[in-house]
Image: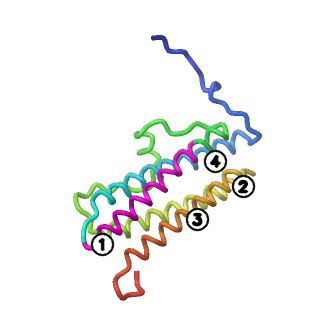
């Protein structure tokens, strides 16, 4: 079986954005994409390993949240391609770009799971806001609009995780 030789120009997508803007926005989106994969897997990990008296509620919530996180991945990657950039190709590339820390602990108490995911989602929202500003600075309203939706969804997850992790009878976090 022969392999056709291609070069990077075969992947060029026409755009009116400046090449520098494409590079900057693509880099920001690829980092968000790597973080989305890392957060998806961590959320699934906690979904699979949650235990305790709130097991059912947490198990269902984490499953729903992981599905929502995974749903962003294709849209982020396709946005990079629409701009003319290239996107992630491997798990090793994800691990190089991700800023969300993995959790490989054998056991994590349920409240700590929720708090860690809450902080990770807050981190994602902040990174999305920075990417949104980059889009605004480079006249890319389509990517900015996509990020606005994802910021709202991420803030919703943060809110749910915060409320679910609060101590009973306490206003404190």
Q: Could you give the CA–CA distance between mark 3 and mark 2, rounded to whole angstroms?
A: 21 Å
How far across and down, in percent of the image, does residue 148 sit? 63, 60
- Mark with earlier residue (3, 2): 2
Tell me the distance, in whole angstroms, between the alpha carbons under discs 3 and 1: 26 Å
- Disc 1 target residue: 54
Residue extending farthest left: 106
Task: Out of 52 and 30, give the one closest to the viewer.
Answer: 52
> Horizontal and vertical percent for residue 95?
41, 45
Query: Which range of residues does the magenta coloring cover?
Result: 53-77
Residue that carries the numbered disc 3 in the rendered image: 152
Label located before the other in sequence (4 or 2): 4
- Return the x and y of residue 149 as percentages of the image width and height: 61, 60
Q: What mark, if any, has residue 137 been given in the picture?
A: 2
Percent across and percent down for residue 86 are 58, 36
Q: Residue at x 54, y 15 (%)?
A: 4
Q: Residue at x 55, y 63 (%)?
A: 153
Tell me the chief SS of the magenta region. helix
Q: Which of pointers 2 and 1 lies earlier in the amino acid sequence?
A: 1
Marks 4,2: beta carbons within 8 A = no
Query: Tag 2, which secondary structure?
Result: helix
Tell me which residue sits at (22%, 58%) in the image. Answer: 106
Regarding mark 4 in the picture, which secondary structure is present there? helix
Q: Classify mark 1: helix, strand or loop.
A: loop
Where is mark 4, residue-wise? 25
């Amino acid at each position: 079986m022969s392999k056709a030789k291609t070069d990077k120009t075969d992947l060029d997508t026409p755009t009116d954005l400046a090449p520098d803007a494409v590079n900057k926005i693509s880099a920001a989106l690829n980092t968000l994409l790597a973080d989305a994969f890392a957060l998806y897997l961590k959320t699934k990990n906690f979904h699979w390993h949650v235990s305790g008296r709130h097991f059912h509620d947490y198990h269902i919530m984490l499953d729903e949240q992981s599905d929502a996180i995974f749903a962003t991945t294709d849209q982020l990657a396709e946005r990079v391609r629409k701009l003319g950039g290239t996107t992630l190709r491997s798990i090793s590339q994800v691990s190089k770009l991700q800023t969300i820390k993995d959790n490989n602990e054998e056991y994590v108490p349920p409240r700590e799971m929720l708090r860690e995911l809450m902080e990770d989602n807050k981190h994602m929202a902040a990174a999305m806001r920075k990417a949104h500003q980059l889009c605004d600075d480079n006249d890319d309203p389509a990517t900015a609009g996509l990020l606005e939706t994802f910021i709202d969804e991420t803030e919703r997850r943060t809110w749910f995780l915060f409320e679910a992790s609060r101590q009973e009878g306490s206003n404190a976090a």
